[in-house]
Amino acid sequence: MRVLSILHDSVVDGEGLRTVIFFSGCPHQCKGCHNPQSWNMMNGTEMTVEEVAAEVLSNPLTDVTLSGGEPFMQAKEVSELARLLRQSGRHIWSYTGYTVERLMEHGTPDQQELLHSIDVLVDGPFIAERRCPGLPFRGSDNQRIWRIEDGTPVGLIFP
């Protein structure tokens, strides 16, 4: 998988202390994106699932956030990573520019598997005109934070 960077000890990318994995590649390319260097799939470093897991698990104090770029562009490898990290007791958040409805109705099998491998999904593209700095854990008010159980959104967090 292609990883732009891994950041330990974030407090802004989900509840609690988190290790954030920023994946390379993004089809959304939202105006005003905070991480435009992640758009290019060739940026970053090629890493195996095992290498990323080892780096994440080297910090015993954090849960995990999958960010980007777009984690659902590399859904097969990212879902494998998420499953491995959950087996190690980590709580998994993921950001995506897709909506949960789009992923559930039109997502690839790998994208659906990634939904089954996470605990919380922040969905929707960042829309600069709807930027709202006071919202917890998201940049614009169209984005939603879903609790996910068995691949299904079961309720909004911070509606």
Image (tube, grey):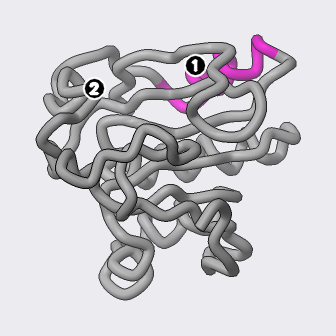
Q: Mark 2 points at which residue?
A: 35
Q: Percent position (x, y) of residue 115?
A: 55, 66
Indicate left or right for 63 with 105 as reference: right
Q: How far apart are marks 1 and 2 (CA)?
A: 23 Å
Viewer-nearest residue: 136 or 148 = 136
- What type is the residue that disc 2 sits on? Asn
Q: Position of residue 131 (x, y in %)?
A: 30, 46
Residue at figure coordinates x 34%, y 20% from the top left: 4
Q: Quadrant of the N terminus?
A: top left
At horizontal 31% and vertical 82% (from top left) the residue drawn is: 106
SS at mark 1 in the image: helix
Which span of residues is magenta-colored? 48-59
Pointer 1 residue: 51
Residue 49 lies in the magenta stretch: yes
Asked if the residue under mark 2 is in contact with the one under mark 1, i.e. CB atoms within 8 Å, the reply is no
Q: What is the tally of numbered marks visible in this picture?
A: 2
- 48 over 90 or under it: above or below: above
Residue placed most toward the observer, 142 or 13: 142
**Does the magenta segment cover residue 135?**
no
Closer to viewer: mark 1 or mark 2: 2
Q: Where is residue 149 in the image (x, y as percent from the top left)?
A: 73, 73
Camera-side residue: 86 or 36?
36
Q: Residues within 10 Å of mark 1 (few under 14, many from 20)?
A: few
Magenta: main secondary structure equals: helix
Point 37% across, 87% down: residue:
105
**Residue 149, numbered label:** none
User: Mark 2, residues whose alpha carbon is within 10 Å: few (<14), some, or many (≥20)?
Assistant: few
Q: What residue type is labelled 1?
A: Glu
N-terminal of the two: label 1 or label 2? 2
